Structures are given as structure tokens and as C-alpha cells.
């Protein structure tokens, strides 16, 4: 047991790919789905044990207080999504959307994706981090295209092209960071090790760092889904299997944002380099306002929530761009709340779309009457994501807005406008979806609503009472982020 | 570093930019693929020369991969796909040749101005290499934007990636270069040829992305 805990970081890295190999061989979707769940749960436990026993950082891996938050959140949502996915895919198999072979492929990729995201989060080497994010991108491309309909293929193709361009720009930025580091830390591996870089970054050439950060922000920003580089995101969310939408929104966007944060820390440690904040604030606000207005015209329910993800990633990027203890705290909290709430919404939406046989918003009415648990779950989720009290999202949005008003009142204007516009759009759409005369099928869904209820419960709880150790941890991380 | 080896490195990297320009105006798919193979050969030369100059034997691996994979395997495979799909007659460009070339010239000058100004501290070879690499990256991006056909978009992406390899090998002593080039090559081959093109052909009988656009359900 102690040996397991000591090697916990290797466990979260190697358990998913090992499971993937087994899943590749395993026939029968029921067993695969269970194994997928069990393995995700074990990975989550290993991630939690990082709190107890933090491994020493090496040339390749690093576990510090910042990325533990990401790893734990990531593995938790990955686990609940695997529970949701088990019942979701059973339905897809019944309706003939996917075959057994597809499901084997799907489960394998799910674990590969999980492993790649964990690697990206604990990588100390910026080259390794890049490789991990690249692998994560390509696995999700395959998963988005899994239905092989015209639209799924278009979405996957668009995602592949834009994601690759983003990832290519990020690599160029990574090379530039190495170029900047080489004269100071010498040739070889050290020039890419984050913990070495952060010690020596003050002596790096600021001009090269500036240029590198622009490429990194644009590159990884594409993966975060920041406007104007977001074009892949709504398609990928709408056309892929719903568990993948949940994983994309709840996890992969965070992983890319984490990469941006690491480089932001480097920039902040060099006094002569440009301040990374204003760039992030601009992109964040742009995404927020743009996505808020785009919410109105959406016909497809998954596409609408994809735009809502762009909006929230905008808020989080903006908060981290502002910096300072309060805004960073709000950013961390908002990221956590958004991951939980948005994946809960996708759980609900996935089951709704399966029950009603459509994703068109206009064709879905009166959910609270036809499917009470799902309907009210969706209502709660949307109310939470729109930022109404007493949910956790309200609290984090309030903190973001509060610290903006205190420090840069002018920026608060577009921020608040964006929040209100998005709020209006979501409420308007929600009214139609949840209330009124039910349309379509009213057969109850067989799937478990446990993941949905768990996530929403956590979000509600966070709005009412945040555990003091969590607050202390977030405050500590917020201080780390400058 | 002596003058001659610098000049040779400069010449080969410059040649890569030149070939990137030539890629821009190829309007037949077969010619485009041949030109891409040529670009890969030039890149392999450049990487090989860097390996020799920097005395970094692992870069020979990257050069060999580039030569075998990008100059031979991928072009041949794409040749076959194009022939089988019967789309070898023409590349449809969204933007006409002249504006594309002008935009390309603007992008190259932009990258020269930016990179040479920013990297004043670095050594001469790395500076030139980075400037050329950024030019190749931007030209690859431009090609992806101006083409509609799936095959030529992939070629654009691979040419962009060639620019990245040039940058990575020019950065002296950079770790993981071989791994990155291997990962890139394998994944591109796997995804693009194996799955996408096959499926897209299966569904549309065309690899024209315009056909993909028409199948969108965003506006009704």
C-alpha cells in the first residue's frame, strides 16, 4: 500500500494506457465499460493520494500545489464521465449508432486521452507537455469523428486542422523558450525543464520570451477555445458522443489553460518581459462577449452549451490574466465549478437527446414534465452555469466581477455586459426546454442519473459552504500564481 | 563556426523557404505532391547539415526519418489516394495565385523583421534558421487557408511542420527533437491517410472541404 502511494504519480500516468491496452483486446462492451469505470476510479484515488505523498520533482515530472488541483479535478470528472458513458453507450449500441467494434475503439481512446491529459498536467518538461497535449488532441479528434456522419466528419476535420495549427504554433513557442533559455542554462535537457527555467528566467532575453509567449498563448489558446480561435469547439462538442463533449469542456480545455498558466508564471518572473496579463484579459473578454451573443442564435442544444464553454473559458482566462490573490482565487474556483457544472449539463443533455431523439432546441419542450429528474437537473445546471445564487458559479463570477470593479473598473463594463447577455440567452432557452407542453417521446430513460446529481450537489454545496481546507489550498495556489 | 558551413546552412534553409513558395502556386495535385517531396528532401539536407555542424548524431535520425517518410512514403501514399479518388486534375484555390504570392512575400518579410530584431542575442546561425523557420511556418499556414481540398490542406500542414522541424534542429542541443519529429510523422500518417481521407471519400466521393461545409447544420 505504501509502495503504491509512493509511486502514485506513475500510477496516474501508466494505469490509463495499461487499461487502454487491455480494453483494446477485450470483447464485449459491458465488461469494457466497467473496466473503464474501475480504472478511472483507481486513477482518481491515486490522484487524491498526491495530497498525502507528493513525489519529488524530476527532469520530466513535477507535482506541485498548482497542478494537484488540476489533476484531482481532471481524474474526478473523468471518473464520473466514465460512469455516465457506460449507460450512454449502451443506448447508442441499442439504436445502432455505434457497433461493438466502435465501442472497443472508443473505450481504448478514452483511457489514452485520460493518460495523455494526466501526463500534460504533471509534465515538468515543456517538450513533454507539448507531446502530451498533442496526443490528447489527436485522440479527441478520432473520438469526435466516431459516428462517421457527414457532420461528425466535418467537425473532426475542422478540429484536426485548427487543433494542429494551434499545436504547431505552441511548438514554435516552446522552441523559442528553449532558445531564450540556452544562453543562460546551457544546452540540453535543462533548457526545457520548467523548474529550472523558472529559477533562471529573470536572466532570459525578454524579447524572445515575449515572442514565445505570443505563440504559446495563441497555440494553447486555440485548444482553450478562446475567440477568435474557437471555431473548432462548437462543432466538436455538437457532433461527437456526449461523454466526449463533457470531457472536452470539463477537462481538455482546462489542461490547455494549465499550459498557458505555466508559461504565464515564467513571463511574470522576468521583470523585463511584457506583462502577460493584458493579452490574456483581452482574449478572455473577447471570448466572453462574443460567445454570449452567439448563444442566442443556436439551434442545437449541444452547440449552445459549447458556446457557453467558450464564454466561461473566457471568464477564467480573464481572471487569471488580471492576476492577484483574489482574481486568481476566483479563476481557480470558477474553473472547478465550470468543469463540474458543464459536465453535469452535458450528462443531462446527452440523456435528453437520446430520450427525445433530437438535439434541436425547438423540438424539445416540457422536459420537467416528461422527464422530471433530467428536466430539473438541466434547470439546476443551467441556472448554475448562468451564475445564479446560491451556486458555486455565482460565487466565483461574483469574485471575478468584484475584483475587476475594484482594480480596473473600465474592464468591468464588457465583463458584466457579457455575463448578463449570456444569462439572458440561457434563461430564455431554458424556459422553452424545460417548461410548457412536452413534445416527443416521454419514455423514461434507463440511464443512471448519479453522476449528474453528484456534480450538481457539489456545485450547490460549494455555493453555500466551501470547506476551509479547500479555501486555504486555493488561496495558497492563488498566491503562487502571482 | 567557419564561414563555409554557415553559408551552406543558410543556403539550404533559404532553399526551404523557396520551395515553400513554389508549393503555394502548384495548382495540380500531383505537382503539389512532387513539390512537397522536394521540400522534404531539402529539409533532410538541412537537418543533416545541422547534425554535421553541431556534431549531434541524433539529428541524423531526424534527417533519415524526414527523407524516408516525408520525401517518399507520404508522397507516394498520397499519390495513390489522389489517383484512386480521381481528383488529380486540379487543385481548387480559394484565393488567386498573385494575391497569394504577395501575401506570402509579406509574411516572409514580417517573419524576417520580427525574428531578426528579437533574436539579436542569439548566434547568427540560430537567428537565420529561426527566421527561415517562421517563414516556412507562416507560408504553410497561408497554404492551409488558401486551399479547399483536403489533400492540399494536409500538404500545407506538413509543410508548416517542416518549418517547425527546421526551427527545432536549428536550436542547438534542443532535447526531444527526434521524439517530436517521430510523433508528428506517425500521427499525421495514421490520422490523415488511414482514417480521414478514407472516410471522407467513403461519405462524399470527394475530398473537397466545400462539400463538408455544405453538410453543416448550423443555419437552417
Image (spheres, helix red, strand yellow):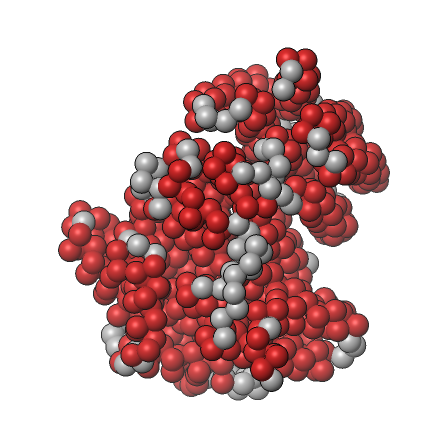
Asked whether A80 or A256 is in front, the reply is A256
> Does residue A14 appear anywhere in the picture?
yes
Q: Horizontal placement of B99 versus A382: left or right? A: right
Residue placed most toward the observer, B180 or B36: B180
The one of A73 and A287 positioned closer to us in this rendering: A73
Instruction: Point out residue A360 in the picture as x, y percentages from the top left corner.
Output: 49, 65
The C terminus of chain A lies in quadrant: bottom left
Q: Is residue A382 above or below residue B22?
A: below
Check the picture and name the quadrant holding the N terminus of chain A.
Answer: bottom right
**In the image, B46: left or right of A165?**
right
The residue lying at 41 percent from left, 63 percent from top is A66
Q: Nearer the viewer, residue A213 or B200?
A: A213
Identified at 34% across, 50% down, the residue is: A284
* Residue B163 appears in the picture as rendered: no
Left-right relation of A310 to B54: left
Place of residue A93 in the rendered image (x, y in percent of width and height, measured from the top left): 69, 75
Query: Is A254 located above or below residue B25 in the figure?
Result: below
Q: Residue at x 50, y 75 (%)?
A: A53
x and y, in percent, of residue A146 in the image: 67, 61
Above or below: residue A472 compared with residue A30: above
Question: For the point 42% across and 60% down, which residue is it?
Answer: A309
Number of numbered tags placed on the structure image: 0
Residue A400 sits in quarter: bottom left
Amino acid at each position: 500500500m505504501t509502495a503504491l502511494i509512493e509511486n502514485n504519480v506513475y500510477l496516474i500516468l501508466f494505469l490509463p494506457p495499461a487499461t487502454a491496452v487491455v480494453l483494446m483486446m477485450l470483447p464485449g462492451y459491458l465488461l469494457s465499460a466497467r473496466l473503464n469505470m474501475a480504472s478511472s476510479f483507481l486513477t482518481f484515488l491515486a490522484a487524491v493520494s498526491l495530497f498525502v505523498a507528493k513525489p519529488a520533482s524530476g527532469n520530466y515530472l513535477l507535482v506541485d500545489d498548482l497542478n494537484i488541483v488540476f489533476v484531482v479535478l481532471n481524474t474526478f470528472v473523468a471518473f464520473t464521465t466514465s460512469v455516465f458513458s457506460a449507460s450512454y453507450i449502451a443506448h447508442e449500441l441499442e439504436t445502432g449508432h455505434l457497433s461493438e467494434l466502435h465501442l472497443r475503439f472508443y473505450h481504448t481512446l478514452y483511457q489514452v486521452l485520460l493518460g495523455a491529459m494526466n501526463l500534460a498536467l504533471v509534465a515538468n518538461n515543456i517538450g513533454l507537455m507539448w507531446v502530451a497535449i498533442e496526443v490528447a488532441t489527436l485522440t479527441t479528434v478520432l473520438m469526435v469523428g466516431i459516428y462517421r456522419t457527414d457532420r461528425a466528419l466535418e467537425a473532426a476535420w475542422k478540429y484536426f486542422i485548427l487543433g494542429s495549427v494551434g499545436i504547431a504554433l505552441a511548438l514554435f513557442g516552446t522552441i523559442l523558450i528553449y532558445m531564450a533559455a540556452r544562453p543562460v542554462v546551457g544546452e540540453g535537457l535543462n533548457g526545457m525543464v520548467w523548474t529550472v527555467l523558472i529559477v533562471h528566467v529573470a536572466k532570459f532575453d525578454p524579447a524572445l520570451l515575449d515572442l514565445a509567449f505570443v505563440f504559446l498563448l495563441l497555440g494553447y489558446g486555440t485548444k482553450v477555445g478562446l475567440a477568435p480561435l474557437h471555431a473548432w469547439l462548437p462543432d466538436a462538442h455538437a457532433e461527437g458522443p456526449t461523454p466526449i463533449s463533457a470531457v472536452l469542456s470539463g477537462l481538455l480545455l482546462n489542461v490547455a489553460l494549465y499550459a498557458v498558466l505555466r508559461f504565464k508564471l515564467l513571463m511574470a518572473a522576468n521583470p523585463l518581459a511584457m506583462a502577460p496579463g493584458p493579452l490574456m484579459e483581452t482574449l478572455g473578454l473577447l471570448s466572453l462577449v462574443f460567445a454570449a451573443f452567439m448563444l442566442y442564435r443556436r439551434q442545437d442544444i449541444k452547440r449552445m452549451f459549447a458556446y457557453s464553454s467558450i464564454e466561461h473559458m473566457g471568464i477564467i482566462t480573464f481572471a487569471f490574466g488580471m492576476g492577484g490573490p483574489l482574481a486568481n482565487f476566483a479563476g481557480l474556483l470558477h474553473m472547478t465549478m465550470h468543469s463540474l457544472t458543464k459536465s453535469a449539463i452535458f450528462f443531462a443533455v446527452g440523456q435528453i437527446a437520446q430520450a427525445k431523439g433530437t438535439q434541436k432546441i425547438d423540438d424539445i419542450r416540457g422536459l420537467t414534465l416528461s422527464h422530471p429528474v433530467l428536466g430539473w437537473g438541466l434547470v439546476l445546471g443551467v441556472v448554475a452555469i448562468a451564475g445564479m445564487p446560491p451556486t458555486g458559479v455565482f460565487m466565483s463570477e461574483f469574485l471575478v466581477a468584484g475584483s475587476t470593479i475594484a482594480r480596473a473598473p473600465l474592464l468591468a463594463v464588457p465583463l458584466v455586459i457579457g455575463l448578463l447577455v449570456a444569462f439572458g440567452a440561457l434563461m430564455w432557452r431554458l424556459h422553452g426546454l424545460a417548461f410548457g407542453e412536452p413534445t416527443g417521446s416521454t419514455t423514461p430513460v434507463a440511464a443512471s442519473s448519479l453522476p449528474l446529481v453528484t456534480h450538481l450537489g457539489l456545485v450547490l454545496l460549494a455555493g453555500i459552504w466551501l470547506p476551509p481546507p479547500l479555501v486555504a489550498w486555493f488561496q495558497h495556489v492563488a498566491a503562487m500564481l502571482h | 563556426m567557419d564561414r563555409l558551413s554557415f553559408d551552406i546552412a543558410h543556403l539550404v534553409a533559404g532553399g526551404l523557404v523557396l520551395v515553400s513558395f513554389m508549393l503555394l502556386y502548384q495548382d495540380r495535385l500531383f505537382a503539389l505532391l512532387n513539390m512537397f517531396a522536394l521540400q522534404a528532401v531539402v529539409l533532410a539536407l538541412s537537418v543533416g547539415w545541422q547534425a554535421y555542424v553541431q556534431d549531434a548524431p541524433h539529428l541524423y535520425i531526424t534527417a533519415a526519418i524526414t527523407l524516408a517518410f516525408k520525401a517518399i512514403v507520404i508522397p507516394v501514399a498520397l499519390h495513390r489516394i489522389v489517383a484512386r479518388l480521381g481528383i488529380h486534375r486540379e487543385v481548387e484555390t480559394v484565393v488567386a495565385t498573385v494575391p497569394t504570392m504577395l501575401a506570402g512575400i509579406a509574411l516572409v518579410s514580417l517573419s524576417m523583421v520580427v525574428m531578426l530584431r528579437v533574436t539579436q542575442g542569439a548566434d547568427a546561425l540560430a537567428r537565420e534558421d529561426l527566421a527561415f523557420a517562421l517563414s516556412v511556418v507562416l507560408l504553410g499556414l497561408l497554404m492551409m487557408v488558401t486551399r479547399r481540398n483536403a489533400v492540399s490542406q494536409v500538404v500545407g500542414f506538413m509543410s508548416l511542420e517542416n518549418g517547425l522541424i527546421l526551427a527545432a534542429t536549428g536550436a542547438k542541443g534542443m532535447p526531444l527533437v527526434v521524439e517530436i519529429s517521430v510523433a508528428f510523422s506517425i500521427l499525421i500518417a495514421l490520422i490523415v491517410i488511414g482514417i480521414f481521407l478514407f472516410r471522407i471519400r467513403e461519405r462524399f466521393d470527394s475530398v473537397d472541404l466545400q462539400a463538408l461545409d455544405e453538410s453543416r447544420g448550423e443555419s437552417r
